[in-house]
Amino acid sequence: MADFYYLPGSAPCRSVIMTAKAVGVELNKKLLNLQAGEHLKPEFLKINPQHTIPTLVDNGFALWESRAIQVYLVEKYGKTDSLYPKCPKKRAVINQRLYFDMGTLYQSFANYYYPQVFAKAPADPEAFKKIEAAFDFLNTFLEGQEYAAGDSLTVADIALVATVSTFEVASFDISKYPNVNKWYENAKKVTPGWEDNWAGCQEFKKYFE
């Protein structure tokens, strides 16, 4: 069983939990208290010198960055390649969506909400515009599409649903983006581990109350 260092409220951690569920891997979950500095202890720095979560340790093999962990779990444990197909073109589109999630969509969340939540900074309207632009892009990607990349559920959907559900608990109005809204409603039904994801979202929601 792989050790999994995480926080339930974290969207990247939740994307790994859902991916593990999808491939039938049980995780030995280890809560890491960042506020108490547990991620800076020497024993954790030995595992992950970048001291980030999520971090996976699978039989002595340590890996961090959630989207890298998602791909690793599917490639090592997936009974089929449906979540991350071997076809170079299909895989390229999935990779593009994963990088979009990391560098644009989730980044826009972090840039707008984290200063407000963790530093009590005022809302930055320019940062909010970046969120709207990111959702506009995602809405375009999803035009006529049931899934984020291709015609079935992939790790791209799982990463994106972890992010979009976090926007929902931050009270961002997803309904203004009809293609995203339709995709999201379906993703809630078809993504393994959605219930775990939503429970983690409720943990994160406390920061907005």
Image (tube, rainbow, N blue to C red):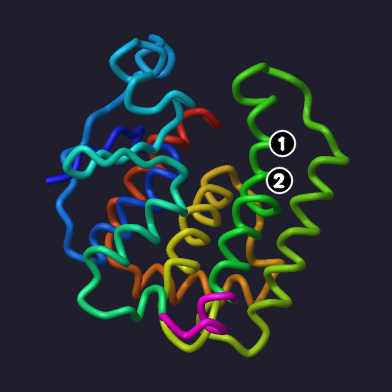
On screen, 166 above or below 87?
A: above
Residue at 80 percent across and 59 percent down: it is 133
Q: Is residue 176 left or right of residue 90?
A: right
Q: Main secondary structure of the magenta part?
A: helix
Position of residue 76 measured from the top left corner of the image (x, y, whole percent): 25, 63
Position of residue 140 measured from the top left corner of the image (x, y, whole percent): 73, 77
Q: Which mark is residue 166?
A: none
Tell me where the magenta segment starts and ends, as one range. Answer: 86-92
Q: Between 189 and 154, which is closer to the camera in this rendering?
A: 154
Q: Identify the secondary structure beneath mark 1.
A: helix
Residue type at mark 2: give it. Ser
Position of residue 7 measured from the top left corner of the image (x, y, whole percent): 36, 33
Q: Is residue 17 left or right of residue 205?
A: left
Contact (Cβ within 8 Å) of mark 2 with mark 1 = yes
Position of residue 119 measured from the top left corner of the image (x, y, whole percent): 66, 17
On screen, 15 above or below 39?
A: below
On screen, 30 above or below 104?
A: above
Residue type at mark 1: give it. Asn
Q: Identify the secondary structure beneath mark 2.
A: helix
**Residue 100: within the magenta?**
no
Q: Which residue is mark 2?
A: 108
Q: Between 15 and 84, which is closer to the camera in this rendering?
A: 84
Q: Which mark is residue 111?
A: 1
Q: Name the residue furthest left.
A: 1
Residue at 78 percent across and 30 percent down: it is 123
